[in-house]
Image: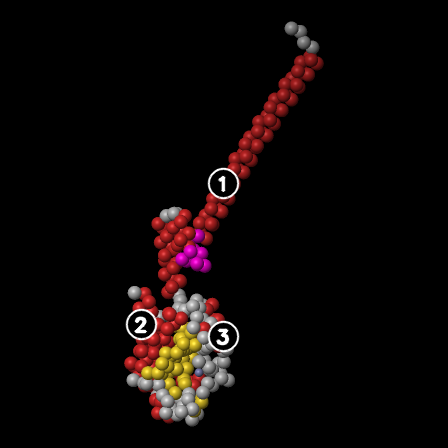
């Protein structure tokens, strides 16, 4: 069939345009496929990261290890997670401290007889108790480390914040009748009464046995701040009467304070040991 030169070129041009359009269409299709694939891959990755993060939170959250154990068991997410939670619980227990509170301090000397200040005797005994307990493997914190004044409520609040295991306050007694002597231990009347009474009993009994001092009574009290505002078993021991000359002189000796501190530490240890049986 005859075709003019002009019509030949017109046809070639049309074919070229068609081929060009086809190529563009291919390129656009390929780009679309790549974009879809990349988007899907990114979404999958993001959901994996979110899942992994929530998994980690379940493993290490220290807020409530007991609850974590329950949640982990309920979710049945495997033996490994249960083991992690048990280790966390043991760690939390191990990090709990025994707070020893040397009564008074700073501007508050406590009772004073013949130049002997209660706050000093309290601190000297408390330091020895802390050393004995540390040697036994306990972690101990003093409610006041130096001769400084800290409000009673603040001492207890600090122990509560630290989730302390026990709180034992050390004081000296006084009486108008100068012949009165001996050791007495106080515990609070609150939700922890039974545990605090048990702690007070062990501390009283072991201190009497270490010193041979007169065994006065175990006294419960519902107003004493240091033993009623605490969230842990607590007691307050009056290790002697500064108003009694003979007992005051004993309290001023290193040897007698050593015996008192041994008794207090042993009582605390016996209470904690009996608790875990
Ligand atoms: Zn006192």
- Label 3 – label 1 distance at C-alpha: 54 Å
Discs 3, 2 touching: Cβ within 8 Å: no
> Magenta segment: does it hold 64?
yes
First in sequence, mark 3 or 2: give its number. Answer: 3
> Magenta segment: does it hold 19?
no
In the image, residue 253 above or below residue 95 = below
Image mark for residue 153: 3
Residue 142 visible somewhere in the drawing: no
Discs 3, 1 touching: Cβ within 8 Å: no
Q: Residue at x 61, y 22 (%)?
A: 19
Structural crowding at the residue carrying mark 2, measured as other residues with C-alpha within 10 Å and reported as few (<14), some (14–19) or many (≥20): some
Report the residue marked by disc 1: 44
Q: Position of residue 42 (x, y in %)?
A: 52, 41
Q: Main secondary structure of the magenta part?
A: helix
The N terminus lies in quadrant: top right
In the image, residue 249 above or below residue 225 = below
Image mark for residue 140: none
């Amino acid at each position: 069939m005859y075709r003019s030169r002009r019509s030949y070129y017109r046809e070639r041009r049309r074919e070229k345009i068609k081929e060009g359009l086809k190529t563009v269409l291919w390129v656009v299709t390929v780009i679309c496929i790549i974009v879809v694939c990349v988007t899907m891959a990114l979404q999958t990755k993001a959901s994996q990261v979110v899942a992994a993060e929530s998994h980690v939170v379940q493993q290490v959250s220290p807020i409530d290890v007991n609850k974590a154990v329950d949640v982990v068991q309920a979710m049945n997410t495997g033996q490994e997670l249960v083991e992690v939670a048990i280790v966390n619980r043991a760690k939390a227990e191990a990090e709990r401290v025994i707070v020893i509170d040397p009564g008074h301090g700073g501007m508050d000397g406590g009772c004073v007889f013949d130049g002997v200040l209660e706050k000093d005797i309290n601190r000297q005994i408390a330091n020895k108790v802390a050393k004995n307990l540390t040697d036994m493997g306990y972690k101990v914190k003093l409610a006041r480390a130096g001769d400084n004044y800290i409000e009673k409520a603040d001492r207890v609040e600090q122990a509560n914040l630290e989730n302390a295991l026990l709180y034992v306050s050390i004081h000296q007694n006084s009486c108008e009748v100068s012949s009165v002597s001996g050791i007495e231990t106080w515990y609070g009347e609150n939700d922890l009464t039974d545990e605090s009474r048990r702690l007070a009993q062990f501390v009283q009994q072991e201190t009497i046995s270490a010193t041979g001092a007169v065994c006065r009574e175990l006294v419960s009290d519902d107003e004493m701040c240091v033993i009623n505002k605490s969230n842990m078993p607590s007691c307050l021991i009056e290790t002697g009467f500064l108003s009694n000359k003979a007992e005051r002189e004993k309290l001023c000796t290193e040897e007698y304070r050593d015996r008192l501190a041994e008794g207090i530490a042993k009582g605390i240890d016996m209470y904690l040991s009996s608790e875990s049986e």
